[in-house]
Image (cartoon, coloured by chain):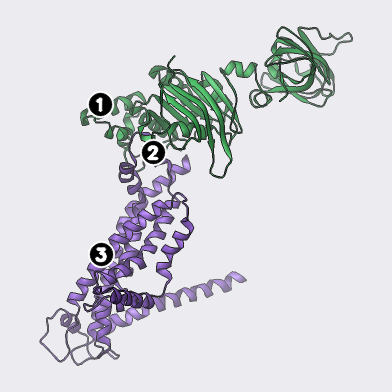
């Protein structure tokens, strides 16, 4: 009786969830194929065309609609996301490694790290810009904003790695030491290959969070805009479907990232499964 | 005399103040096979890990071939450890697993390969050399772990319940292989186990531990026949243990006054008249006899007590007789059906149990 009710209810819930998850994107994707330059960002579609994609790439004759200022901001955002990913992941792995043994004050340090993802972004951004002003430091995407991005994404990388180390069988490291291999080499040859799936996840988190970070960057990045800021800037004038076309491309880029991640993950998980089997048998 | 391994008053106190190991003293000669035996939590694995360097010692000294290794990190100790779960590297082939420790030993690639090939052959692992360990059976993984540990030519091989994860048949086979391997190589083995059959059949000497302390260090046979402490008497073999008071000591013979009358046995430890003591009688030393009208009486060399049969069963050619002493203490006897015919010991019947005084041991009560 109950299950006959629960099942359709859950199905509806799931359908709604998927709808709200993907509907905005689908609408954007459809509107990005609006004709141009006279077509606007609303239904109905006057005529299907790839005008806005070509507009994005500068392949159409000049019109009254300015091209999206994305080329430099895109590079900036990618560069910032990459730097953030590298630093946050390294910090995340190192600090999670430190937390494998309890040390004095580890509880407080834990909360201090995690605080970085809890505090409201706008406030932190504002605070950072005030501090930079007071100290006479220029604000740049690669300095003040970069620091904030690391503070924000580092806790995510840290928590991912903490979970990975939690399930890590320490005896393989002990076995390596006991065979005469010092801790540094042990980490490179044994620990790192085994935690690599976790490192990948931490990298993905750090990259994507930084790539579309808005509120912290808003006050802290100075004159040169990152991609989310540049796009937001165009909204304040007038919205054209070229933003949607760009949205589609950037989403496809994210999917490509995910695909790479999934491929690498599958390889690692296949290995991890074998480890699990081994432990089970042992 | 230069010992291969010496532990001198080694102690371990956990951060929360609990003592894990107390005053551990042991000296091991080269090529000896030593087992640490005890219930879980007795400190045997902690002691092994202190020798390996995974745990810091709180007090005392550990020496290998005369030089103290207390302050050396694990990778600089001349020991190698085999783990209960083998701890093989899942991302490396069998060959790389075995050669892993050699990579930092300054050998040429050729020398390393030769060594690995030799070990693969010794442990019959040639067929699986290029597979990953997780594809292999428990017995094979066990041998890979051994090969990997032996490749670096340790002075002492430490084994932490290495057979615990194997099924009973495989365990017997590997047990035999392990013993042969150890004798061939002449390396000192220190082996941790909670299974007394393993310890009794493999080792030259057994260290019985309980609650962080050594109860007894003896060759297996002596541990079995001459327990030093009540704990060992309960833990090893199937012994009947009775409380009593020492009435007299003549040479190594002790006369003990117990609830079953005067019983005599061989003294083990300092005993004086009036002292509380225990007599330990191995099940193997006892014989059951039907109680005759003029039953035999205890002499100084033979003890006799009356008992009641609770049950008797025959399994194959072995009779199992469950007996209760007048004190209620149960005793389990077994013997060939020719010796104990099935119908000779009906349940509820009175019998007498006899044993030679020399086969019973009298130890101080605490």
Mark linked to residue B114 = 1
Q: Earlier in the sequence, mark 2 or mark 1?
A: 2
Q: Residue furthest right?
A: B293
Q: Secondary structure at mark 3?
A: helix
**Which residue position is annotated with label 2?**
B88
**Which residue position is annotated with label 3?**
A82
Crowdedness of circle 2 by 10 Å Cα count: few (<14), some, many (20+)?
many
Discs 1 and 3 lie in a common subunit: no
Distance from disc 2 to disc 3, alpha carbons, whole Å, reads: 35 Å
Measured as percent of width and height from the top left, residue A265 is found at: 33, 56
Distance from disc 1 to disc 3, alpha carbons, whole Å, reads: 45 Å
- In the image, residue B60 sits, relative to residue B343, either above or below, namely below
Q: Chain of mark 3?
A: A
Q: Secondary structure at mark 2?
A: loop
* Callout 2 touching callout 3 (CB < 8 Å): no
Q: Quadrant of residue A185?
A: top left
Q: Chain of mark 2?
A: B
| Disc nearest the viewer among 2 and 3 | 3
Q: Which chain is purple?
A: A
């Amino acid at each position: 009786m109950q299950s006959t009710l629960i099942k359709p209810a859950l199905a509806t819930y799931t359908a709604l969830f998927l709808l709200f998850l993907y509907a905005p994107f689908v609408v954007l994707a459809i509107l990005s194929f609006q004709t141009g330059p006279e077509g606007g960002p609303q239904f109905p579609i006057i005529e299907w065309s790839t005008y806005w994609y070509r507009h994005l790439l500068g392949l159409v004759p000049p019109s009254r609609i300015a091209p999206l200022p994305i080329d430099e901001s895109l590079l900036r955002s990618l560069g910032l996301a990459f730097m953030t990913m590298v630093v946050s992941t390294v910090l995340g792995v190192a600090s999670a490694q430190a937390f494998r043994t309890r040390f004095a004050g580890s509880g407080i340090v834990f909360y201090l790290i995690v605080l970085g993802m809890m505090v409201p972004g706008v406030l932190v951004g504002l605070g950072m810009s005030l501090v930079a002003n007071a100290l006479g430091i220029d604000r740049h995407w690669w300095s003040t904003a970069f620091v904030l991005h690391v503070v924000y994404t580092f806790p995510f990388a840290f928590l991912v790695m903490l979970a990975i180390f939690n399930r890590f069988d320490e005896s393989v490291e002990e076995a390596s030491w006991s065979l005469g291999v010092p801790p540094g080499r042990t980490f490179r040859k044994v620990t790192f290959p085994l935690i690599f799936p976790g490192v990948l996840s931490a990298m993905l988190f750090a990259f994507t969070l930084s790539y579309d970070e808005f509120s912290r960057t808003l006050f802290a990045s100075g004159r040169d805009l990152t991609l989310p800021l540049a796009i937001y800037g165009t909204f304040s004038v007038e919205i054209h479907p070229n933003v949607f076309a760009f949205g589609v491309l950037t989403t496809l880029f994210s999917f490509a990232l995910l695909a790479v991640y999934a491929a690498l993950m599958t390889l690692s998980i296949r290995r991890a499964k074998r480890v699990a089997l081994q432990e089970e048998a042992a | 005399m230069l010992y291969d391994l010496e532990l001198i008053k080694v102690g371990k106190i956990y951060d929360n103040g609990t003592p894990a190991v107390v005053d551990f003293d042991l000296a091991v000669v080269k090529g000896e096979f030593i087992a640490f035996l005890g219930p879980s939590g007795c400190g045997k694995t902690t002691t092994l890990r202190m020798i390996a360097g995974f745990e810091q010692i709180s007090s005392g000294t550990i020496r290998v071939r005369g030089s103290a290794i207390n302050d050396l990190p694990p990778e600089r100790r001349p020991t190698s450890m085999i783990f209960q779960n083998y701890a093989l590297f899942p991302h490396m082939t069998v060959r790389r697993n075995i050669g892993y420790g050699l990579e930092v030993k300054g050998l040429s690639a050729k020398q390393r390969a030769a060594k690995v090939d030799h070990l693969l052959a010794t442990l019959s692992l040639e067929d699986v050399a290029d597979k990953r360990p997780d594809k292999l059976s428990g017995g094979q993984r066990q041998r890979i772990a051994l090969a990997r540990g032996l490749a670096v030519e340790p002075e002492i091989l430490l084994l932490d319940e290495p057979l615990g994860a194997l099924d009973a048949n495989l365990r017997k086979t590997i047990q035999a292989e392990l013993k042969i391997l150890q004798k061939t190589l002449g390396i000192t083995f220190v082996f941790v186990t909670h299974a007394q059959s393993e310890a009794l059949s493999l080792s030259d000497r057994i260290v019985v531990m309980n609650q962080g302390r050594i109860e007894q260090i003896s060759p297996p046979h002596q541990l079995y026949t001459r327990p030093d402490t009540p704990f060992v008497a309960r833990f090893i073999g199937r012994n009947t243990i009775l409380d009593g008071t020492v009435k007299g000591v003549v040479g190594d013979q002790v006369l003990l006054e117990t609830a079953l009358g005067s019983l005599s046995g061989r003294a083990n430890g300092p005993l004086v008249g009036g002292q509380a003591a225990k007599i330990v009688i191995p099940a193997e030393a006892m014989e059951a006899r039907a109680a005759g009208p003029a039953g035999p009486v205890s002499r100084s060399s033979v003890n006799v007590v009356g008992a009641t049969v609770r049950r008797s069963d025959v399994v194959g050619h072995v009779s199992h007789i469950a007996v209760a002493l007048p004190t209620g203490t149960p005793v389990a006897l077994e013997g060939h059906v020719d010796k104990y015919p099935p119908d000779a010991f009906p349940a509820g019947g009175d019998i007498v149990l006899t044993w030679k005084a020399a086969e019973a041991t009298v130890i101080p009560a605490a």
